Amino acid sequence: MSTSANASAQALHQRFSDLFALIAQDSIARETERRLPFAEVRQLKEAGFSSLRVPVEHGGAGVNLEDYFYLLIRLGEAESNLPQILRVNAGFTELLLERKDDADTRRWLDVIGSGKTFGAAASERNAATGNSVLLEKDANGHWRLNGEKYYSTGTLYADWVLVRAHDHESDFNVLVPADAPGVERVDDWDGFGQRLTGSGTTRFHNVPVDDAQVLDRYHVSQPRRNTIITSFYQTFHLAALSGIARAALRDAVAFTQPRTRTFGVPGNSSPRENPLVHRVVGRLASLAWSAEQLTLAVAREQDALHAARRAGTVTTEDYNALDIKTFEAQQIVIGQVLEATTLLFEVGGASATSETRRLDRHWRNARTLASHNPAIQREAAIGNYHLNGRPHDERFGNGYV
């Protein structure tokens, strides 16, 4: 991070540091009780976190991506569920920032700038991939939305739902109030990690939709090109993972410092003076630092691409190269964070496995985040790009992933 960027990010962090500390304070209790963080999400909205990327003229802070991801890493350190809860809202903001400057774009930027947030209803859990949620007109010519989605991350906490729907011809982004008649949000996410993200089922029962809520027609079966969105969504995961690595380091230090006994050493001892413990903590610190720096390096590439886009000099190859660099960072960050969240237990032996400490949540959350996108497929895409110059061929259209 450059000196100027570091100064601005640090100042931004100071604005939220007390809130992050408060969020971290109750993280173990929330995990143990499976207490959904409605209050914490509300506090983040009220503090302006959910609108940081929204331009100032639309009610946001207009921060750059490097500073934004720096801050997101620290939120992930406090509570890794919270970045993921806000991921779709952030992605939709980026989608709007890439759209043409029209009335629709300005309207929805104003909505996010006012503190309202969006959750996801994009993916489905069926025998085959596809988009079965239908947007059709009834006998009176009014739009109606019907169907079911899963992996609805953040929707339990959201004011609006970003729905990927189909009309038998193409796909749409449909924006539906979360409390609209016929919207059913179900807390049935059963993953062993990221348990508080609300990533379960959303059903739509004849939900009324007006024309202003239908945004962007596209084809989900087509590769996504000339957009930052693929890179942005993946970097969001990398930031949450980097935050988890920082939390593992924090908790390893907090666990070790007051301890007065060491395996195989009679009487009292000081593990914090043990060179072997020094090595473990040193490795944890290195892994956390490296994961963060890789994430911020991708963010700087994204900022540079945004600048090129505004200048009219960006090319399709620039977008392809950004995606590949993001996938390359993904390959390394995932391994580093999973190593850190396992290595953490080497500072304390069996006592570190006490459920009162919930240190296992770091590995479970990291493993769950790492499973959200196909790292092994991305590794093959990286090789194909370098060997044959072929861009990746992930097929998510221009909508939400």
Image (tube, helix red, strand yellow):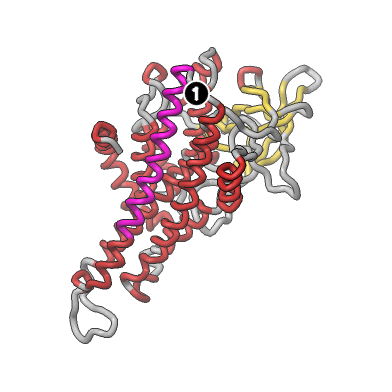
Residue drawn where x is 34% and y is 40% of the image: 70
Q: Quadrant of residue 224?
A: top right
Task: Compare residues 39 and 363 and report the one nearer the observer.
Answer: 363
Residue 236 included in the magenta stretch of the image: no
**As drawn, is 388 to the left or to the right of 295?**
right
- Does residue 255 appear left or right of residue 123 in this picture? left
Residue at image x 39%, y 63%? 359
Image point (47%, 33%), residue name: 90
**Majority secondary structure in the magenta region:** helix
Which percent across, then down, holds residue 235? 46, 41
- Quadrant where the C terminus lies? top right
**Res 186 seen here:** no
Q: In the rendered structure, which segment of residues is drawn in magenta?
A: 284-312
For the residue marked with disc 1, what is the amino acid?
A: Val
**How busy is the neighbourhood of tag 1: few (under 14 within 10 Å), some, or many (20 plus)?**
some
Residue 249 in which image quadrant: bottom left
Q: Is residue 339 above or below residue 76?
A: below
Q: Report which residue position mark 1 lands on.
A: 314
Residue 341: x and y in percent read 41, 61
Question: The N terminus is located in which quarter?
Answer: top left
Is label 1 in a helix, a strand or a loop?
A: loop
Question: Residue reaching furthest front?
Answer: 387
- Residue 289 spot, x, y in % from top left: 32, 51
Q: Is residue 110 above or below residue 292?
A: above
Residue lying at 19% horizontally and 84% vertically, measured from the top left: 267
